[in-house]
Amino acid sequence: MSGRNSFMIVANRLPVDRTVEPDGTASWRRSPGGLVTAIAPVMQRRHGAWLGWHGAADERLEPFDQDGMSLVPVPLSAREVELYYEGFSNATLWPLYHDVVATPVFERDMWDAYTTVNQRFAEAAAEVAEEGAVVWVQDYQLQLVPAMLRKLRPDLRIGFFLHIPFPPVELFWRLPWRKELVEGLLGADLVGFQLPGGAANFRRLCRRLLGLPYKGNEIFLDDRIVTTQAFPISVDFGELDTMVRQEHIMTRAKEIRAELGDPEHVLLGVDRLDYTKGIGLRLEAFGELLKEGRLQPNEAVFVQIATPSRERVDEYRRLRDDIELQVGRINGEHAMLGLQPIQYFHQSYGREELAALYLASDVMVVTPLRDGMNLVAKEYVACHHDLRGALVLSEFAGAADELRQSYLVNPYDVEDVKRQMMTAMRATPHELARRMRTMRRRVATYDVDRWAGEFLNALETPALPSSTPHNASWRSD
Ligand code: ADQ
């Protein structure tokens, strides 16, 4: 059966959050974030639908409209949230794809739940897609959907985008269900990655695991071609740039500095509380700078904002305890009356407050051990029209490919992190402006609109017939 939507997003979550008023009435609010902002206009133009879980377990909801988007809730049971979402997605795939910085869990019942839920998403999408519709599947939670959907609806044009890194063959190889996952992704016409390296890892894997030939960006199946390509995601530069130029945001930025005691240097970290983000190592580096006397406690304040995340997964609970212990230890050693060198907040902030924080800080410290892109780094750049501010950025964040004028660090080398933090703090305004100007040009040009536009353009432009398997290489890498 064909539905009425010619364009669809299929993602683990719907782009809305439910808010409940004090009188008990519930309403939906669009979740903040670049993806929704970039996609919303396309959705409105094309009678788009967004399929995803609405965030509450064991609850079935009818499709509803919000902000000109048609939303189709896909239900999950509490057990599925545990096994498919917290389990296979976040305890198996997440650590495996992030260079095993934590040990992945391989459990069969988690895999079974992942398969069941992916099938449910595919069936829901098949149900509401118009003949020949374009369907864009998002991220690691739904890697089986492309093939499942193609089986049900071969008429659709299917794209997939992976927001996290795609690991090297040697790491992926450990996965007991490696063949099924790769075949799932190959159901798409276009598989998008953050970086060319991820796309190359995927092509090599297809060759090694399934013996499929590839040439350039194209993988040759018996009856079709799958294009693999990098599309580095970005932020809504225009929105952030406009926001931080408003009087009340600039005033708020000044207030923040005053509330912090007007220190010479404000350093900032903003992350989901996740073990891939390298929060502990940057605090360690800051603590050592204080200990060695290279920084005085009244000279610099480190503001670390850590958004609560995946709190029911063991690894995340342990991480929270570790970070809180570490903050307590460093502050205990270096605090002076009324002065805490690390200000730690385990909270979520609104967009405007976050923008004011970016504007207020002198050095943004982004030190993930591995990160698909890292939007925080790009948001920081978008917020510094004043050309002040330095970005210390891990070489292992996707964003490092584009933001070459940041102070790049190897997060595994604490001395390097310390050195670059100090260099950033001591840089002249002229040097900071030179770096920031170039980075801003990059983020302004490659913004999130361009990301979505380029992906959809590639998805809707089928691979040229001149590319045939006959001239494809059989590389044995
Ligand atoms: P994340 O791992 O969530 O995303 P990131 O790209 O940094 O990481 O995005 C986080 C977003 O959450 C940013 O927009 C940030 O502003 C916001 N945020 C963080 N802390 C916040 C707080 N305390 N309050 C409010 N907002 C907060 C995954 C991948 C990334 C990839 C993105 C997009 O892991 O590598 O860049 O998807 O593809």
Image: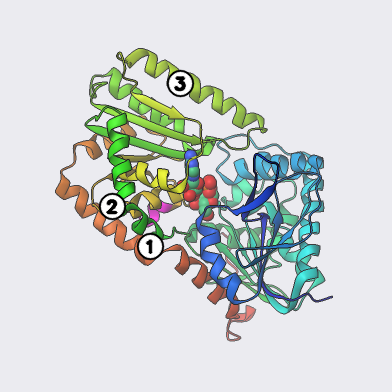
Q: Which is more foreground, mark 1 or mark 2?
A: 1
The tag on residue 326 is: 3
- The region drawn magenta spans 399-406
Query: Mark 3 or 2 closer to N-term?
Result: 3
For residue 34, side relative to residue 104 (left or right): left
Label 3 – label 2 distance at C-alpha: 31 Å
- Residue 200 appearing in the image: no
What kind of residue is marked 2?
Gln
The tag on residue 238 is: 1
Q: Which residue is mark 2?
A: 405
Mark 2 lies on a secondary structure that is loop
Q: Quadrant of the N terminus?
A: bottom right
For residue 201, side relative to residue 125 (left or right): left
Q: Which quadrant of the figure has residue 86?
A: top right
The image shows residue 107, relative to residue 61, as above or below, that is: above
For the stretch drawn in magenta, the main secondary structure is: loop
The image shows residue 4, relative to residue 169, as above or below, that is: below
- Residue 382 appearing in the image: yes
